[in-house]
Image (cartoon, grey):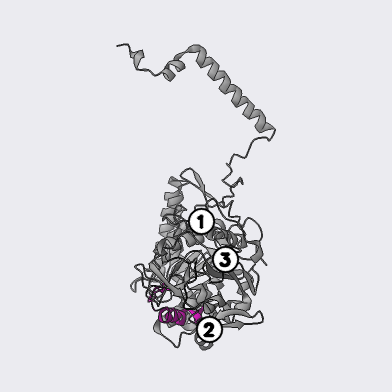
Amino acid sequence: MNSADHISSIGHGLLNRRKFMRNTGAALGGLGLAGLLAQDGLLASDDPANFSGKTPMRPDVDPDKPYAPRPPHYHAPAKQVLVIYCPGAVSHVDTFDYKPGLTKYHGQKPPGLPAVTFEGPSGNIAKPFWEFKPRGQSGKMTSELLPRLGALADDFCFLHGLHTQTSAHPQGENFFNTGFTMEGFPSFGAWVTYALGSENAELPAFVAINDPRGPARSGKNNFGNGFLPAAFQGTDFNAKNPPANLARPVSYTPADDRSTVDLLKRFNDKHLKTYPGDANLAARIASYELAGRMQTSVPEVMNVSGEPHSIQREYGTLDGSNLKREYAKNCILARRLIEKGVRVVQLFNGSDPSGGNGITNWDSHSNILKTHAMQAEIMDQPTAALIHDLKRRGLLNHTLIVWCTEFGRMPFLQGNGTGRDHNPDAFTCFLAGAGVKKAYSHGESDEFGFKAVTGRTSIYDFNATVLHLMGLDHERLTYYHNGLERRLTNVHGHVVPEVLA
């Protein structure tokens, strides 16, 4: 058999001299045209536009100094952000979303509401388990479940029209904190520190303060770096559990420590020169160097016991349940980190990777009267004290506060008659501090708090707005990964201008 018989028809075409010359001429003509268009400035940027049609604005990250401060896309009032995250889904209709219709239809089952929800058959409409009262000069109606936070309502900007894509906790946490229900995507804090770095070289740029009971359902996904460089993962510790292995052995003198650090730096610098441009290597070295600096900076910032008695009493470290006292210490730690210039602090109120049903988080499928009350006793006083303390110290002039949870709860009871099921179609979060309106409510749910009807705000919109308040364009803050310009808001999201001051 002739070897030419194994060549395809396309291959035969390439062996044809006339076709080869014709194709080459056309290709050279195209290259020439591209060159002429480039000279006249008529070609698009070398950096391809993303889905929105905007050219990406990737931060200029020095691998040797990944935490160095970087400018935002535009001037913005918020330089730091404190995220107070409540895993388990806080019931909006029992806290901040006042619905008189629930009292009107209490014990009934109006038409149009689903017969079956996430965990099974639905029961009857239930009025709020706690009385709502007007607060502050604005008269904002909030419940007696969280009276101290309610007292600060004049400082808050509520978003009542929130909705999400999932009613499962792990996916809900992932979606709220990373923009995707799947694992493996960068968290909000990782995106912000990737873009802006940090003003404090002695502490991590992004700190996640886990609940005293442990991590939330999605664990490190909530503060992970995903496919961003490893340097931008959140560092997790709390007032009870400092970062591991920071203490110097007793037999090791400060001079020994210093000489070892100097020697390691020389070795690392030499190794880095051998592999220039290796971002992973540079990130590892930067992380170890930061850990060395943290040996002195972390013990100082974690000295919450040194706070005045008046602060301890205000936050609640001296009374209440042990969990409340430990959470109160976490709140003091959060304030101290913000004072030190840490870019992103994520404070968790609730935990349990395996569930909890209201015992370790806000997930109240049964006996909501008891379980939500238990969580509120832990969260209300310390969180309100934290926000008030930040305001008193002037830190809210440049700090944005985000109080949030993954979704809401149903206006009717479950079949068991004592708990509320998951509700992805309506829930409430609030913002406070730099760049947002005060004593303002955006959006509404329907008369039962079942579905968002006006000012509907997706998680994409919410995250786009928070990034905007940090001076970042969510459509242009991207990272090229697996052939795609990835971003926190995927290909969705719009800033909510109504909440901006």
Region of the chain picked out in magenta, as a range: 358-383
Determine if the magenta segment contains residue 50.
Answer: no
Residue type indicated by callout 1: Pro
How many dots with numbers?
Answer: 3
Determine contact: label 1, label 3, CB under 8 Å.
no
Query: On the image, numbered disc 2 is attached to which residue?
Result: 131
Sequence-wise first label, 2 or 3? 2
Q: Residue at x 61, y 55 (%)?
A: 473
- Vertical placement of 305 versus 460: above or below? below
Determine contact: label 2, label 3, CB under 8 Å.
no
Residue 397 locus on image (x, y percent): 64, 71
Determine if the magenta segment contains residue 360.
Answer: yes
Residue type indicated by callout 2: Glu
Sequence-wise first label, 1 or 2? 1
Sequence-wise first label, 1 or 3? 1
Query: On the image, numbered disc 1 is attached to which residue?
Result: 66
Residue 272 locus on image (x, y percent): 44, 49
Calculate the distance from the C-alpha at mark 2 to the C-alpha at mark 3: 22 Å
Query: On the image, numbered disc 3 is attached to which residue?
Result: 161
Q: Residue furthest right?
A: 40
Calculate the distance from the C-alpha at mark 1 to the C-alpha at mark 2: 50 Å
Residue type indicated by callout 3: Gly
Q: Nearer the viewer, residue 71 or 373?
A: 373
